[in-house]
Image (spheres, helix red, strand yellow):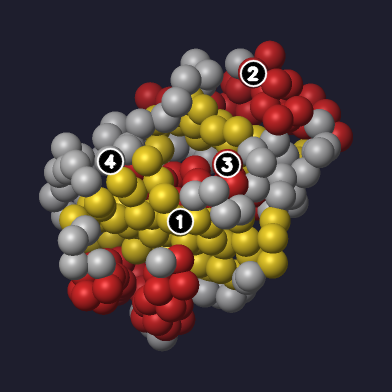
Amino acid sequence: MVNKIIETVKEAGKIILSAHNQESSITAKEGKKNFVTKYDVAVQEFLFKELGKAFPEAEFVGEEGENDFSINGLRFIIDPIDGTTNFMQDYRCSCISVALCNENDVIAGVVYNPYTNEIFSAEKGKGAYLNGERITVSERPLSDGLALFGTSPYHPENTDDTFALLRKVFDFSRDIRRSGSAAYDICMVACGRCEVFFEKGLQPWDIAAGTLIITEAGGIVSNYEGQAISFSTPNDVVFANPEAYKEFRTLL
């Protein structure tokens, strides 16, 4: 199951790598600083078509277009290019994120950064992997580690709260980082390079695949209130190793 998703996602990555003049294909979406390019649409259409052949019983939810979050049964939740602003400016840190869910339960997840050729993957109950090698979260506390964050740019009403919390985390940790791709940041925590990632107002397609990858790597996922996240509404999320999670909760 996961191998078929990986195969399809790697083919879709070729569309991203072949892109040129990205800024000439930009369309603004609803909300501030929210954009889509023709490549986002092309990658999503490719994934829907090819994964639909391999999993004909599955429904699809994707970032580009209208979505029905009430779908029951087997469904894919897909972000064709997570980090579109990076992609537009050729910053070369964008990912394809694909999650296969049964009801609200993620059973397979793949995040692919075509620029670094990193494939993060997980199947429920079978561990998390980076390019076929088993990965786990770090054992470092946040006080001795790195924190990743998102600025939730589509929701300016969250800016003050985000940066107030960020200042606390910066003072408490070794340092902070921001890649511009939530899916990639989650995987950085899953493979132990960083200790925590947090952001307000993320959509299901930003986090669905990463949720399984990090839990299979031994990490913890919750909303800011410490509750399970939803794949039908936006979430304020934290992804962390167990020790860093406890420290982050005290900062909240």
Q: Is residue 147 left or right of residue 28?
A: right
Residue contact between numbered discs 4 and 1, judged by CB atoms under 8 Å: no
The label on residue 5 is: none
Identified by mark 1, the residue type is Gly
Please give the name of the residue rendered at 50% of the width and 56% of the height, measured from the top-left corner. Answer: 123
Q: CA distance from mark 4 to mark 1?
A: 14 Å
Q: Position of residue 177 (x, y in %)?
A: 68, 45
Residue 196 visible within the image: no
Dot placed on the residue nearer the N-terminal end, 3 or 2: 3
Identified by mark 2, the residue type is Arg
Assess disc 3: are there few (<14), some (14-19) or many (≥20) residues with their C-alpha within 10 Å of its C-alpha. many
Please give the name of the residue rendered at 44% of the width and 45% of the height, measured from the top-left corner. Answer: 207
Please give the name of the residue rendered at 76% of the width and 28% of the height, measured from the top-left corner. Answer: 243
Q: Say if 99 sits above or below 112 in the image.
A: above
Mark 4 or mark 2, whichever is nearer to me: 4
Q: Is residue 45 left or right of residue 85?
A: left
| Residue at the extreme right | 144
Dot placed on the residue nearer the N-terminal end, 1 or 3: 1
The answer to which of 235 and 85 lies nearer the viewer is 235
Q: CA distance from mark 1 to mark 3?
A: 11 Å
Q: CA distance from mark 3 to mark 2?
A: 18 Å
The label on residue 103 is: 4
Mark 4 or mark 1, whichever is nearer to me: 4
Residue corresponding to mark 2: 249
Residue 5 visible within the image: yes
Helix, strand or loop at label 4? It is loop
Residue corresponding to mark 1: 109
Dot placed on the residue nearer the N-terminal end, 2 or 1: 1
The label on residue 215 is: 3
Dot placed on the residue nearer the N-terminal end, 4 or 3: 4
